[in-house]
Amino acid sequence: MDTTPSRPTGASLFARFAYPPNSLGLCGPPDSGALLAQAAGGGGGDDLRTLAEGFEGAWPYLELIAAANEIDDPLDASVVEAYWIGNGLLDNVSPARLAGFLDHRFRTGGALGWQASPEALAATACAHHNFHVFSVYPWVALLKGGRSPEPLRVLEKCRVRWGRVQELLGDEVTVRGRGLHWTGASLELGTLRDETVAWRHDGRAFIAPPQPREWVALHWDWVCDVLTDSQLAELREHTARQLATVNGSVTRPAPSAAAR
């Protein structure tokens, strides 16, 4: 029997995006089956909170966003949305606070956060998953060092990206979007191409069957959520911002779409 949740709690929304890399053994606790069951069930109990706290990369960002916005629960739905997709809560995480967080939590010689001044961080950094992928993980540095295509593949899969549904194929769906393209000097969004990703596994799904022309959020090889127009604008904005950082053409951004 299919198990498809209604609109998720913050905890189950976190699990939707955390499950794909967790199922590959890339991050988080070892029980990915429990994470899938909880996310598909749409719940938000203590078991799911314990699983979420086991994600040593993502969980501190949720705590940071929540604290900066005086929200008691890091798994509040608006906090989780801010980290994976983006919303106005990110504007309240000051550059100084983010710089201190990065220096304390993710110190490594190849990352942006502790090499940049607060002024530079104001123009480049935010507590968003795609910032972490492009500027804290070492993949961009490896790409610039000539180690392709593996860094490009990981950057493409690990970033939260968007695409438009083309066709439902059983437990999979064909989605059209713009993948990353490395020119040898800059990292850009390339031409439109189709990819096939999962939306359901063993009768468990995060969303209702995807419909043609819907915009969806993707993480690794999974559809994680259906995007509203404002969420799509947020995700595009944060991706463009991080690509500008990678390519050294950053200007201070306007407030996010959700804050206007």
Image (tube, grey):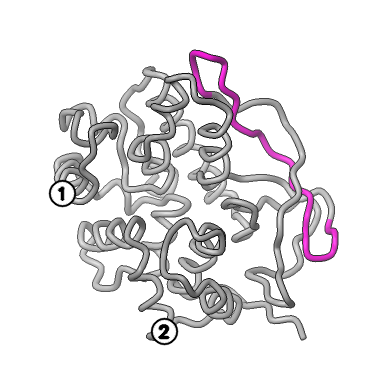
Q: Residues within 10 Å of mark 2 (few under 14, many from 20)?
A: few
Q: Please, what is the dominant secondary structure of the magenta stretch?
A: strand
Q: Residue furthest top?
A: 185
What residue is rendered at 19% in x and 29% in y? 115
For label 2, the SS is helix
Q: Position of residue 5 (x, y in %)?
A: 62, 78
The mark nearer the N terminus, 2 or 1, is: 2
> How many marks on residues?
2
Start and end of the magenta stretch? 168-187
On screen, residue 110 above or below 46: above
Q: Amino acid at mark 1?
A: His
What residue is rendered at 31% in x and 42% in y? 126
Q: Quadrant of residue 150?
A: top right
Q: Amino acid at mark 2?
A: Asp
Nearest the eye: 162 or 70? 162
Give the labeled residue for mark 1. 104
